[in-house]
Image (tube, rainbow, N blue to C red):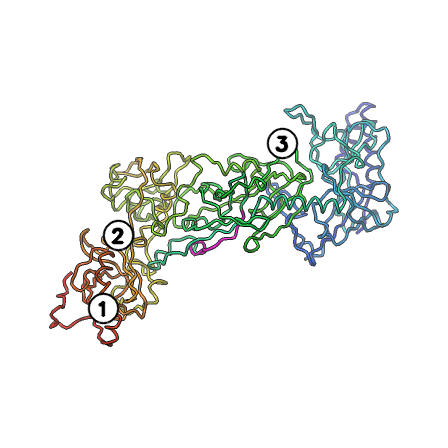
Amino acid sequence: MKINPLGLSFALAALLASTAAFGASAEEQAKTRRLKAAADHVLAGSVAIAITPKLDGVEEPILSPVSEKCPNCGRYHSFGLSSALEYERSIPQTGFLLPGGHVLCRDLCLNPENIASIEVRKGEATAAATLAKVFVEQKAVLLKLADPLAEAKPLELAADAGKPAGAVAVRRRLAGRNVELLAAASPTPGEALQREDGAARFQMEGDAALLDEAGRLCGFNFNADLAEDGAFDPAAWQGLDLDALADATARAEAAAANSTLPVTLAFRDVKPQRGAQQRRWSRDDDASKLTELKTLGTVVSESRIVVHVGDAREALTRLKTIRVFFPDGTAEDAQFLFAHKQANVIVAALPAPRPAHAMRPAGTRLADYADRLLTLVRLTPAGPGKTKIRSNRIRLDTLEPGWRDLPTLDIPARESVGLVVVNAAGDVLWTAVDILETNQSIGQDDRQDSNTMFLDAQAFAALATPEPKDVDGAIKPVSDEADGAIGWIGLDLQPMNKEVAESLNVLPATENGSFGGIVVKVHPGSSAAKAGVEAGWILLSVRPRDAAAPLKVQVEDSESMFSGRFPWDRYDEIPAEAFDEFLPTPWPAVKNNLTTQLMRMGVGTEIVAEFVANGAKTAKTLVIEAGPKYYATAPTFKWNAAGISVCDLTAEVREYLNLADDAPGVVVCKMESSGKAVVAGVKQFEVVTRVNGAPVKDVVEFEALVKDATAFKLDVLRMASTRVVQFKTGAAAEAGAGDVKANPDEDDDDDDDGSA
């Protein structure tokens, strides 16, 4: 590809035309001529650079070397090396030829192992080059030519040059098959800026050769800002050769790995579910089944560690241990302290102080690190107690507003937890964390997503000592018995849709039926009952008193694959294996998105609930209470000898079966296809009301009644019909093989008459 070195920018052409058209003064015309001469001089020493990337035997760098900031979305659109290699494209650059066979150009932050070759071109002449030096305070590198470039004229600084008063930026563009270099000459270095601390700077665009008042070359600048008292001569810039760069990278990786450690979270096994519907509402089956998570944690003080939890947030109620692995090979169990409400992390206490591993936040102004050489380290879990460490040098641009108006970074890299930005001293400037989005509604398809963003090290460390409002009291380890607890305000709700909203004349209030729940029952003694809420009202939203915005309520439809018609008429045809996988409970699930969200808000929290009552909106202050036991959490007894498990009757089961509060019985909540009771005809979701003639109040009584017996007569209720099921267990079953009855003869003295 040929280079046209004679291109001149439209900016300079326009400047020349304007001075002629408006009769500029002789001084202005002389300045314009000096700018044109300077542009020609800089163009003569400018070169085109083509970097051929390399992926053979090495990984894609974690920082994309080619990226553009989108003017529409404001984010970086990055291009990996694989996309360049796919089309056999090089990465283009421009540079300035210096004496001694060196080329000065912008630092793309491409790791040396990802560079296959570098070609420098001027006109028809080409020469190979290698990376020789990376500058620390300028966003630039120095290349070393293998051979001279005949058509290029090295740019030398004037010996008696003054301070920068102008600039020439060089750009490249395609002109057919050739590359054209364009010089944009400016009578000032850039836009003059005055900082609050009194420092004067110029904001610049692009890489530039600097000119003094007389138009002579006085230096170069590759940073976004130019300080009046800065160093402009590359010979005076601090730089690292490849060996020194490798040493600096190793120190940065070690510093990051010293405080960001591998952590393993262990969870107890999930309780067996009771029917397919109890799983159906869950939004993340993987998290619900999780028993172990290998993750990362950062020691932010001598005794506290902030641990990333990723998709395991919902599993934290089952958390057993937090195992922290240190670089010396030792491991310790940390103690759970709390989960943060907005950052997707937990905070734990180390058993003993570890001051040597505490993260060291950088103490200077973050803005002062703009364009300086830093190291971006990515740590990822790589097995028990191990991390994989990769890194890239990085230059930071301007900061952007992030979570809670804290400054954040937007870098051309796939953001993930485990990313840490470290300076040359091993101090941490930035670390990545998942920030949970604030939901606007509570609904079936609702999920609290998160965005990964960078927090400065001091803000990240502050996650370990939050204000009380930022502690998520609902996310914490609980006992197996308490797992599945719900928040409760005492309302049973029916889903809303457009047709129902139209019939109730609440289309505007419910946004055409897209949200809202119809109150079908107010439980006596509940917070809603005490506040005067009535059946027929429509719940629109709930808002904790300290929250800025309410959450719209969307009630999920509890209907199953049977469209609300449970197949009792074909119940005996359903195989036992189908119950847990495919058959939902006949009664509606008590745990849903609303009761789960109320639990997250916290028992004892005051909320403002907005209703539509008698055609008008009204607000009620309610207090979230601990919800009652329900089918999925009711106390259980596993009867191994008979192959079934039973649990206590709960309110929703009694209501569905129209049973009085004092009616006896326990529900069959689990069964094995070969169990004695199952073979005799007992089915899941049926109610055992009597054992050998004795009424059963709960699982404690049931266990006592079956404990020492071997022959059984169970009164079994299926909806409104009761039957007697007889069978034997243990030695008695062997002695009387085949003696299994689901409907005993009427002449049996102990037979039940079939009444409920």
Given the image, on which type of amino acid does mark 3 rest?
Arg
**Quarter-wise, where is residue 223 in the image?**
top right
Q: Residues within 10 Å of mark 2 (few under 14, many from 20)?
A: some
Q: Residue at x 35, y 62 (%)?
A: 580
Question: N-terminal of the two: label 3 or label 1?
Answer: 3
Residue at 65%, 46% (x, y): give it. Answer: 67
Please indicate whether residue 550 sits to the left or right of residue 419 in the image.
left
Can the viewer see residue 227 in this picture?
yes
Q: Which range is magenta?
A: 286-296
Q: Name, please, the residue furthest toward the right.
A: 150
> Which label lies toward us, 2 or 3?
3
The residue that mark 3 highlights is 365
Q: Which residue is mark 2?
A: 652
**Mark 3 closeness class: few <14, some 14–19, many ≥20 residues within 10 Å:** few
* Above or below for 689 versus 449: below
- Disc 2 versus disc 1: nearer the observer: 1
Q: Closest to the observer: 687 or 528?
A: 687
